[in-house]
């Protein structure tokens, strides 16, 4: 379980979420959020984008990055520090999401749950 303040953001680092597989690169380890998406926030990728890029590609932030909601990300995205959970600001004690962890080009996956404390 990890903690994030109401309305705040939490970087999902490789200390929090880490998977490895023999012979697989970090970009081949994929996380896909399944039916139980966060109820009080969202998972976003924070990436640098030109200020004049289309607004429908995410929310432009003052630091020049764009927060783009996602339901799929890789271990490489986590290692690069671009995967974040953004709390909506709605009062809630906790939030969570379920995800599948799998290797690119393999049908086998592992179901897991990520829990966030907002209290």
Image: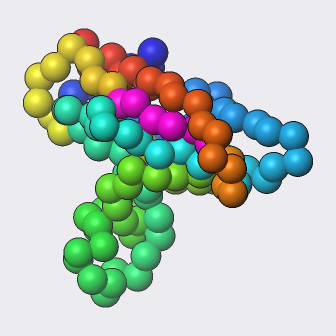
Residue at image position (43%, 58%) is: 46
Q: Is residue 4 visible from the viewing direction of this image?
A: no
Q: Position of residue 90 (x, y in %)?
A: 11, 30
Residue 51 rendering spot, x and y as whole percentages: 34, 81
The quarter in which the C terminus is drawn is top left
Q: Quadrant of residue 118?
A: top left
- Magenta residues: mostly which secondary structure? strand
What is the quadrant of residue 42 in the picture? Answer: top left
Q: Between residues 40 and 61, which one lies in front from this camera angle?
A: 40
Coloring scheme used = rainbow
Q: Residue furthest left?
A: 90
> Residue shown at 41%/82% (left/top)?
50
Q: In the picture provided, is 33 more to the left or to the right than 118?
A: right
Residue 14 sits above or below residue 25 on the image: above
Q: Residue furthest bottom?
A: 52
Question: x, y (%) of residue 24?
Answer: 81, 49
Q: Position of residue 8 (x, y in %)?
A: 29, 35
Q: Is residue 112 left or right of residue 20?
A: left
Residues drawn in magenta: 97-102
Up/down of 26 relative to 17, above or below: below
- Residue beneath the point at 76% across and 37% down: 20
Residue at horizontal 53 percent and vertical 44 percent from the top: 31
**Is 80 contained in the magenta span?**
no
Q: Looking at the image, is 35 positioned above or below residue 104? A: above
């Amino acid at each position: 379980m990890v903690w994030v303040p109401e309305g705040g953001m939490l970087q999902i680092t490789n200390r929090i979420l880490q998977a490895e597989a023999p012979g697989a690169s970090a970009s081949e380890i994929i996380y896909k959020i399944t039916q139980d998406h966060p109820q009080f926030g969202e998972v976003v990728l924070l990436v640098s984008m030109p200020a004049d890029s289309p607004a429908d590609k995410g929310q432009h932030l003052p630091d020049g990055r764009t927060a783009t909601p996602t339901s799929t990300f890789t271990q490489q995205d986590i290692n690069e520090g671009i995967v974040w959970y953004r709390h909506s600001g709605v009062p809630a004690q906790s939030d969570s999401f379920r995800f599948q962890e799998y290797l690119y080009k393999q049908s086998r996956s592992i179901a897991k749950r990520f829990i966030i404390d907002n209290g």
